[in-house]
Structures are given as structure tokens and as C-alpha cells.
Image (cartoon, rainbow, N blue to C red):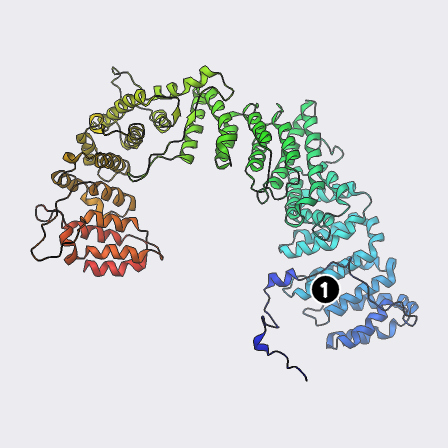
Amino acid sequence: MKIKSKSSYHKSENTYKFLTFAERLANVNIDVIHRIDRTGSHAEEVETYFSEGLTKWRDLNLTEHFSAFLKEVSNQSQSFNLLVFHQKTIVESLKTHLAVKNSLASEPLLDLVVQLARDLQTDFYPHFPDFFVLIASVLETKDTEVLEWAFSCLSYLYKYLWRLMVKDMTKIYSLYSTLLEHKKEHIRKFAAESFSFLMRKVPDLDGLLNHVFSDLQQHPDKAEGAGQLLFEMCKSVRKLFHSCSEKAFPVALRKLGPSTCPDATLPWDTVRDALDHMVQAAANHVEREHFLVLWESLQASVVEVLGVMEAKGEQAEQATEQLERLLFIFQTLVSHKNGAKVTKPDSVCQTVLRLVQSSSLSPSCSRLLLQITSSLLLGENISLPRALIQETVQKVFGSSIEQDLILEFTKEMFTMKQFEQLFLPSMLGFTAELLCCDDPRSRHCGLDALVSLILAKAPPPTDGSMAFETYPLLFNGQTGVLSGEESAVPELVLSLIRFPEEQKQPITDLSLPWAALMLLPHLRPIAPASVVPAVTAFLNRLLTEIETEALGKAGLFVASQAMSCLLTLDGSAQLLSLVTVDKINSILRKFPSDLSALLLGDLYYTRLSLSGVSEHLSHSALQELHQILCANLSSNISKIRLLTLRILSQFEAELPPQTEGEESVEVQPVFAVCLQAELVPASVQDYREKLLHLRKLRHDLVQRSLPQGPPGSFQQVPLRYLIAMLFVNFKPLWEAVIELLV
């Protein structure tokens, strides 16, 4: 019984699927070297490849274009003697028909060019430049089949004529290399792939690379194409490198400077760009375990050039520039996909250590070296022994590299795994040396590094609801620096906020006190009892100078940080004895919409609320503060609204009494309702929840939530807040808000 085939409706995918141009390009195969030659030319009755090709295409292509060509040449190629005799006529006929735009006979004509070259060999070679120009003109198409035919034709010509071409490589490369600067990337890629076979056949690779790279002087746009060509030359199947790469990589890397390439003057930076592209292309193709040949060549080149530098001879300056180019390529390879192509991390790290300990590095080389080091230590795909990581970090901090570069490197390392165990001790020792020296600039750099660390690891709160985090910075002499120097760091930082009482001039430089206030909660060993009085005195002085207008908004910013520092150090309820309510209210009255002033007030009143100081959070105090801050409720800045609502929500508002017969329901003050709405983000996922809170501000529902007071005092709160919601850049919210307003 015949089983019925499955209906096309039940197929898992369509028989015919639309392919994008990129997908069709990916399917193009011009690798003719590994194709099996299936022609029947071994048959005795066939004398020429060209005649065999004509016979094949006579049945496969019946277009008018090919039929016209067939009539011209069919009687001139039955035998090899006839073909040689009529070769000029056949060549001219091929040229004429290849020049036809949008020809339907492109595939057979390009194939017949190859067959003619196989037959004529040396006699065909003089015609190659003309055919190359004609084939190149066909490439301006989006038909991927035509592209495949054209590049396959070129590849076959290189394959069958390579013995003649390698003797005339300068001329052939000059002709071919025009495709390397083509505006379309896929043309450059196919051109490099087709020519790579010929590159491998050249016996004098050193001389060829000199010619390839010297051509970049006049045509720098060929740099990427030249890099792609070198990659295709060294590329093999199964994501491996070709056997020629063991010879090619060292020769190519020696072309990066005159120290290792004294017999040629090349555009060194353009050569670097070409080799960098070669390395990127290789990293995208070759598997990690097969990358060792490139790593060994690169490390050997680095060590060789470093030796020339350290010899401090006449070539030392040129060697420095050459090392910079090598390190540029080194960094490209190390950082690729977070170290996915680093075959032997330990060996690479040893090379880095060798460079770090050199005293001959220029600032640009040092910067690249530190970028390589950070890529090695941060790479998710790189595994290094703990001891080697610690040694590397210690050598970097103990090196002769400029401190600015080391601090730049330090800031990149904050996300490192096991940062506190492997990196922080050495960093603290380095910053202690900077802080304890007499140079003001070094002190600034040390403070900058520590403040950046705190901002990354334990940033100060941006509103009163956030926890006061601490990140212990332990200066106890265990990091390799003299114990006396390290233990002096906390006192030195504390001295930055101590000013003599007799000093009447206003504080001019606020950067150092701000840095000190950022660090004081985190420094160890230091007794909070010795710090709190100094911070309190500094904060009160700041507030006084702000009130008298000796300091402006910059002073407010530092004052809010001083308040944060004070609350972190002192968790007790004695805040009123340190800073009075009147001072805070005076600042809010003077700067009601300043973010720093509002943060200062939020931190202060949140601590009062948590401490249970009810006499300063009474209904009358709320009325006074509401008059100062009420305009903020309709602000178009979310942070201003949030901090204002947080401050007003700390007070004990007196709500209207419940009427007789009304159900006993807990009612929230209007500020708490607005705060809940403000905390919900205006997003597609959450805006419905935000609307639930906003609907509680409807005129008939909100009356129970309005605190008692003179007519018109608190009635504007819901109205102001709903108007502010129209500033939120989220259209689905607006219609509902307008309904509530109306």
C-alpha cells in the first residue's frame, strides 16, 4: 500500500524562503581551491577545455546573448591547433560579449574565460589585465550569483596562471589592489579571499609585503582591504590558521617600524591599521586553542622591540613608536570579547610584567600597557592565578609609570572580581604615599582616587530613604607602606575640614573639604567621637556663610554632603544638639527649590522622624514649611517633587475629624498619597499603578486627606501635583490626569 506523502501544510518550514542580501552574500562560495574538478576533459575525443565548455553551455544557456557568441566562435575551437590559431578572434569576442550590460550570458562567458586560460596558459597571460578590468566592471551589482561567478572566475585564473603571476607580482597586485579600496565591504572581502591563494605561492613574502604596505602611502584607504587580504592568506578551514601563518605573522609584524624593518620606509601608522584589521578578522574566525601561533609571534615582536628600546641606542626613539603600534594590536587581541582569544593568559601576563618593569616606556606606551593590563584582569573569559594577579597589581603600583595614568587605570578596575582582596590593599598603599607627600597635586590625585572608589562602591544617599552605606578603607600599615605614613592618612583627611576659629574669611576652596566629607565615614582606623565635632563645626559654619550669602549653591552642595557624613557617623538621636531646626528652615526659605537644600532638609527631617522628636514635626511646623515649599509640588523636575514630598510627609498632619455614621477607614495625608504616586515610574508596565494613586486625588475623595488649616492653605496640594503630572513625558498618563483636573 502506497503511503501518502505529508501535506505541504504540515511542513516545519517553507520550501522557498526569502533571503536578505546579507544572507545571500553569506551563501556565496568562491573557494575554488578545495573544489573537485569534475570536468570530462580526460576523454580522448575532447582536445580543449574551451571546446568542452562550449558543448556544456550550448544546452544549459539558450539565451540570445550566448547564442550570438556561440555563432562567432563555434567553428574556431574544435581542436587545440584551431584554438591557438584563432585565439585573438576568440579573445576579442569574449571581451565584446563580457562588456554587454545586464547580459544573460555572464555565467557561461566567465566560465569560458577560465577554460580559455587553461588551454592557452602563457599565451593567455598578456590578455589577463583586460579581462580583469572587464570582470571588475561586473561587480557593481546586487545579484549575488553574478558576484559569485565573477570572483570564482578570478580565483580560477589565479589558480591556473599562478606560476606566471608570481614572477610579475608587482604588476598583478597593482592591478588587483584597486578592489581593496572598494566602497562596498563584501567586494573587498571577496577580492581578498580570491587573491589569497596567489599570496601563499609567492616565495619572497618579505618583498611582497614591502610592496603591499608601501602602496598604502599613496592609497591609505586600502588599509582595511590589505588587512583582510593578510587574514585570508593566513586563514584555513575549520576555524584554523593556514600553515603559512607561522612564517607570515612574524614577517608582517616586523613591518611596524624601522627597528625591525630598516630596509624600507613604510607608512607605519597605516600599516598598523592594516595589521589591526587582520587581527580583528582573525579573532572573529579562529578558535582560541588555535590562536597560539599569532600570540607567540606578537609576544616575540614585543620583546624584540623592547630590547632595542632598553639598549638606548640611536634607534631607541623609533623603537618606542614601534612598540606603541605593537601594543595597539596587542590590546585589540586581549580585549576581544573579554579575552575570548587569549590562549595562554599566564604567558601573556608575564609579557605584561616584563613591560611594566621597564623604565623606558613613553606615556602613550604606558597608557596602552595599562589598558592591556585592565583587559587581562577584568576579562570574563580569562583565568589567572591569584598570586600572578597580586604580583601584577603590585608591580603596576610600584612602577615608574606616571601617577595620572596609574590613577586612570585604578578607576577602570573598580568592577574587578575580588577587588577588595586582590587590588584594594595595593591601591590604598599607593594613595597613602600620594597623600603623605608634600606635593599638592599628588595629594589631589590621591583624594580623587579614593573619592572615585567611594562613589563607585558606596555612594552617598540621594534621599532620606536610602541607607547610609560604609566601605571600610583600612590604613593600618599592612599594604607595604610605612605604618606611620598609613596611619596618618585619616588625620590628614580630617584636617581638611578643620579651620581656625579666628579665621574670619569665607571658605573659598570647597573641593578638598567635600572630598574629606566623602571619605571620613569610611576611613579606618578613626574614632567617630573625634570626627563628629569637627564635621558639626564645619557644617554650622557652612550654613552660616550660606545664610549671609558669603557662599552660594556650591556651599549648599557641600553642606548636604556634610549632613550625610554627620548622620553616617552619628546614629544617635542627638541631631538637634548638633544642628538646629531654625538653621535648616532658614536654608530652605532662602533656597526652596534647590536640590542640595532639599536633600539637606530631607536627610535632617527623616532623622528627626526616626528619632521620634515630635515637637519639631507638629502640625504648626508643617504649616510653616508648607508655605515655603508649596510651589515645588507643581515643579517639572521629578527630584524636586520627590524631596519636597518626603520632607512634608515626615510631619504629623492633623486631618479633618471623621463624621458621624462614616465607616472607620484609615486615611493617609495628601502628601503621603502624592509620594506614593511619585515613587511609581511612568512606564508601560507601571503607569496603571501610578493612576490608582493619582485617582485618590480626585476632588471629592481627597478632602479627608487634606490637613486642617486656614482656607486655601492645603487645598491647592492635589491640584498642584496633578498639574505637575502633565510635565511627565508619558502620553497615556495625560488623559486621565486631565479628567481628574477637570
- Residue 56 can be seen, yes or no: yes
Q: Is residue 742 above or below residue 555?
A: below
Residue 223: image location, x then y, percent: 66, 46
**Which of the two residues, 255 or 217, is positioned nearer the viewer here?**
255
User: What kind of element bears circle 1?
Assistant: helix
Residue 565: image location, x then y, percent: 31, 29
**167 left or right, relative to 4:** right
Taking the spot 76% from the left edge, 58% from the top edge, the residue there is: 155
**Which of the two residues, 101 or 728, is positioned nearer the viewer here?**
728
Residue 493: image location, x then y, percent: 38, 21
Q: Amino acid at mark 1?
A: Trp
Furthest residue in direction front, as rendered: 1
**Which of the two residues, 189 or 638, is positioned nearer the viewer here?**
638
Taking the spot 45% from the left edge, 29% from the top edge, the residue there is: 449
The C terminus appears in which quarter of the rendering?
A: bottom left
Q: Examine the image and state in which quarter residue 104 appears.
A: bottom right
Q: Examine the image and state in which quarter residue 368 appears.
A: top right
Q: Is residue 513 above or below residue 26?
A: above
Q: Which residue is mark 1?
A: 149
Q: Alpha-carbon neighbours of circle 1 within 10 Å: few (<14), some, or many (≥20)? A: many
